[in-house]
Image (cartoon, grey):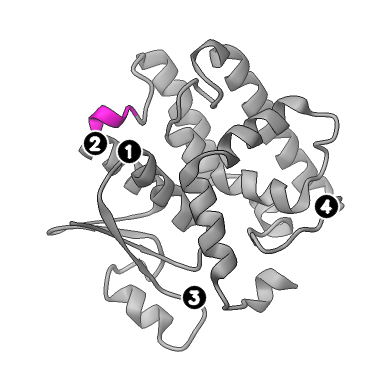
């Protein structure tokens, strides 16, 4: 049985990504949740992998860490789920969009930490975070425009690219800057938030009781 080790659902954006990919692939998997920044948390995580961070996927003797690597493993383990577009050129584009999320947008993450319990519309962002947000919205707009005929997600049907941007959807749900005049972004967020796994993740996050001061400030 696959086992995914995650952190707090309310805060752990990196945990959400592979969890969502597994759920959308229809995979049978168990979840081990380790509340972060508590006594013993790091030791419990290190028992699953040397990085000392979540998420970690265990599949028998195979251990995979890092969100994007786990998503890639899931795509290969469950090819019938079609977590990458079939067309090589479109797949390369989707991988580039997903990888840009994995390695970028530091200011956006810093100024809009994922906190599903938090609703603070109209947060004012600094210049770097504003530029990050503009880039994200441009990626969403262009990807959806190129593939709108195939479905409501970035590349038509749901893909790993959508899993990688799912935490951004939740961040914008909390803070909502610059979206009043962007119906395309709202439509994409609505499609993502309508997914049953996303609704389940939100419900489970709201049921958590831990508080992490750095994310609640």
Q: Disc 2 designates what residue? A: 78
Indicate whether residue 104 is drawn in magenta.
no
Q: For mark 2, give the secondary structure.
A: loop
Measure how far apart labels 3 and 2 are at the Cα level: 30 Å
- For label 2, the crowd category at 10 Å Cα-Cα, with few meaning under 14, some 14 to 19 and many 20 or more, is some
Q: Quadrant of residue 148?
A: top right
Judge from the rendering whether residue 119 lies leftward or rightward of residue 36; answer left or right: right
Q: For mark 4, give the secondary structure.
A: loop
Q: What residue span does the magenta drawing correspond to? A: 78-82
- Badge 4 or badge 3: first in the primary sequence: 3
Is the Cβ of the residue at disc 1 closer than 8 Å to that at disc 2? yes
Residue 85 vertical placement versus 66 (above, below)? above
- Report the disc number at residue 121: 4
- For label 4, the crowd category at 10 Å Cα-Cα, with few meaning under 14, some 14 to 19 and many 20 or more, is few
Magenta stretch mostly in which secondary structure?
Answer: helix
Is the Cβ of the residue at disc 4 closer than 8 Å to that at disc 3? no
Judge from the rendering whether residue 194 lies leftward or rightward of residue 5; answer left or right: right
- For label 1, the crowd category at 10 Å Cα-Cα, with few meaning under 14, some 14 to 19 and many 20 or more, is many
Can you tell which of label 4 and label 3 is closer to the viewer?
4
The one nearer the camera, 123 or 46, is 123
Q: Is residue 37 visible?
A: yes
**Residue 12 x, y percent position in the rendering:** 52, 62
- Badge 1 or badge 4: first in the primary sequence: 1
Q: Disc 3 designates what residue? A: 36
């Amino acid at each position: 049985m696959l086992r995914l080790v995650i952190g707090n659902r309310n805060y752990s954006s990196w945990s959400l990504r592979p969890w969502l990919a597994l759920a959308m692939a229809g995979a049978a998997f168990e979840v081990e949740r380790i509340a972060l920044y508590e006594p013993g948390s790091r030791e419990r995580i290190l028992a699953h992998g040397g990085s000392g961070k979540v998420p970690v996927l265990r599949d028998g003797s195979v251990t995979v860490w890092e969100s994007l690597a786990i998503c890639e493993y899931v795509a290969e383990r469950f090819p019938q789920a079609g977590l990458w577009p079939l067309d090589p050129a479109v797949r390369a584009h989707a991988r580039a969009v997903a990888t840009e999320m994995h390695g970028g947008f530091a200011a956006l993450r810093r100024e809009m930490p994922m906190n599903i319990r938090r609703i603070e519309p109209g947060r004012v962002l600094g210049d770097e975070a504003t530029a990050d947000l503009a880039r994200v919205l441009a990626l969403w707009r262009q990807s959806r425009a190129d593939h709108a005929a195939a479905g409501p997600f970035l590349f038509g049907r749901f893909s790993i690219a959508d899993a990688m941007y799912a935490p951004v959807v939740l961040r914008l749900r909390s803070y909502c800057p610059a979206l009043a005049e962007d119906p395309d972004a709202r439509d994409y967020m609505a499609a993502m938030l309508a997914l049953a796994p996303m609704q389940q993740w939100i419900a489970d996050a709201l049921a958590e009781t831990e508080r992490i001061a750095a994310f609640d400030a």
